[in-house]
Amino acid sequence: MTRLSVNINKVATIRNARGENNPDLVRFALACEAAGAEGITIHPRPDERHIRRADVPLLKEAITTELNIEGYPSEDFIRLVIDTKPSQVTLVPDAPGQLTSNHGWDVVSNSEMLSKIATRFKEAGIRVSIFVDPDPVQVLEAKLAGADRVELYTKSYADEYAKNREHAIGRFIDAASAARVSGIGLNAGHDLSLENLAYFHERIPWIDEVSIGHALICDALYMGIDETVKAYLECLR
């Protein structure tokens, strides 16, 4: 069954707006787990505008499911991840001040660098995922670079879903099929929602994990976190 990892960056954004510890990030992560989420995702950016470095060890110690840490592999980020030893690290090509992830790696052009970084993480016992666009070439290159998984950047699917969902999913089926044949694990994330997740999973049922933040947190404002997590899990059945 495909696992649901909840990205809690937006919860940290709300907390940081007042400079206090409300909402409590650890409490929220534990509530996600209690509702059935099988992982927690965080993306500690250099400016700490949502997840702070100090949050990372607290979350690692508190949660009982998998911790997935996303980020650009600067030396500071690499040290933080190796010190924390999460279940998974997801390498994203974000610039330091970038608002949100908006493209995958060109793994072909960065294969040597990504391979060296993947080796460092794997030697520390951390599963490595590389964030890529839905392109079979990039998926296969990530496998050659030593990644354990790829995460497909799903914004284009979400943007086109309402207009033509069959067309929207096409490139993702191609990329996911390449992952399946090559033996590399498969994750997906960005703008997946209650509207489009079930169809994505129906067409690509072998996906290992989806990481969902913004839409899920927005839904939780209306539905509560318990009912929201259960609704997303239902899309993956």
Image (cartoon, rainbow, N blue to C red):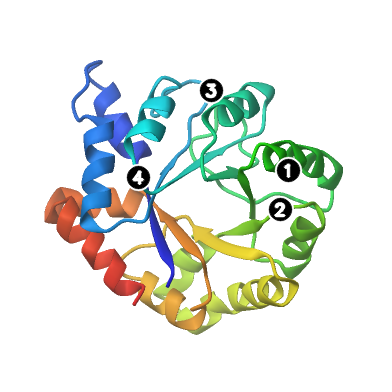
Residue receiving disc 1: 118
**Type of the residue with mark 3:** Pro
Residue receiving disc 2: 147
Tell which circle, 1 or 4, labels the residue nearer the N-terminal end.
4
**Type of the residue with mark 1:** Ala
Residue 104's tag is none
The quarter of the picture where residue 26 lies is top left
Q: Name the residue rendered at 59%, 65% in the picture.
A: 186
Q: How many marks?
A: 4
Tell which circle, 3 or 4, labels the residue nearer the N-terminal end.
3
Task: Between label 3 and label 4, give the one nearer the viewer.
Answer: 4
Residue receiving disc 4: 64
Q: Residue furthest top?
A: 19
The quarter of the picture where residue 148 lies is bottom right
Q: Name the residue rendered at 73%, 43% in the picture.
A: 118
| Residue density around tag 3, few if under 14, some if 14–19, many if 20 or more, within 10 Å | some
Q: Secondary structure at mark 4?
A: loop
Residue receiving disc 3: 46
